[in-house]
Amino acid sequence: MLSSSGRRLDVSQPFVDAMLPGGHRLHVVLDGISRGFAAVNIRKFVARAHSLDDLVALGTLDGPSAAFLDASVRAGLNIIVSGGTQAGKTTLLNCLTASIPGSQRLVSAEEVFELKTGHPDWVAMQTRQAGLEGTGEIDLRTLVKEALRMRPSRIIIGEVRAAECLDLLLALNAGLPGMASIHANSARQALVKLCTLPLLAGDNIGSRFVVPTVAASVDLVVHTGLDADGSRAVREIVAVTGRVENGLIESEPVFVRRSGVLERGHGVPLRRDAFERAGVDLDEVLGVGRWAP
């Protein structure tokens, strides 16, 4: 199974995370680390959604929220997709990338290839583990830095887990539109985690720098969840206001799911000028006077 991945599994490297030839995700833990047997896990991706319209058909989104997200992507807003394990973050991220104009250059970086998009100008990169000599490792931080040298119009990070969050924020703060996913229990917790992960980059990185940077760099957080019946649905879409109060980033709900329905909140993206430059009437997309409470 690992023959086509270029990754190894042995006593010195008892874990492996790789992609199978069919596109499925493989993770193995050798006996001795796991108790009594080698734990082989295969995540099979049954991609039934390739666009935001597909998510509407599946009930993950509704028409107004999908139209808003499509307009936000075309306008170049920075979007973070949050959720728990198996909540559909990667699928949602794939569907969001389908709204990126084909004239733009997309560069993505992941630990293991998971993103799939039909974008005509797309460069996909994944990390590499160290060789037998303990050298040659390429981590996600390196890929993010290299992505910035590839003339990207957009940057996509499959999932931020550690110090690479700092490099992503620096790229977004420099005006490069981007998207990423993150494990979190809510949109607010996703913002908190975005403020703590960069601190892993070193002792010289402090919250006094990170928190305002997150507030200025992130435009939207889309939180998705897994229901008890196994269905996946977007729970909330929040807009970051850019304001920080007592060390916490303020946000406003654009859409919130109540009683199984995504209802329009009072939030509005801060960068309305981005919609204007993209030729999008934000008031029309949000249905002001029709959806607003």
Image (tube, grey):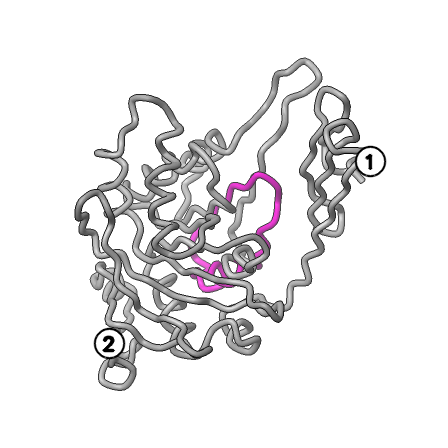
Task: Please tell me which residue lies in front, 75 or 189.
Answer: 189
Which numbered circle lies on residue 283?
A: 2
Horizontal side, residue 18 vs residue 114: left or right: right
x and y, in percent, of residue 163 in the image: 42, 32
Marks 1 and 2, how far apart at CA: 58 Å
Q: How busy is the neighbourhood of tag 2: few (under 14 within 10 Å), some, or many (20 plus)?
A: few
| SS at mark 2 in the image | helix
- Local crowd size for mark 1, using a 10 Å CA cut-off: few (<14), some (14–19), many (≥20): few
Q: Which residue carries the number 1 mark?
A: 37
For residue 150, which quarter of the picture?
top left
Question: Considering only vertical position in the picture, is 115 above or below 199?
Answer: below
Query: Callout 1, which amino acid?
Result: Phe
Q: Residue furthest front?
A: 35
Magenta residues, as a range?
94-118
Q: Does the magenta run of residues contain 116? A: yes
The residue at the far top in this view is: 133
Q: Is residue 285 above or below residue 206?
A: below
Residue for point 55% across, 55% down: 90
Per the picture, the main secondary structure of the magenta-coloured stretch is loop
225 to 123, vertically: above or below: below
Q: Amino acid at mark 2?
A: Asp
Q: Is 99 covered by the magenta stretch?
A: yes
Quarter holding residue 35: top right
First-in-chain label (1 vs 2): 1
| Residue 240, position as x, y percentages in the image | 26, 56
Residue 209: x and y, percent? 23, 34
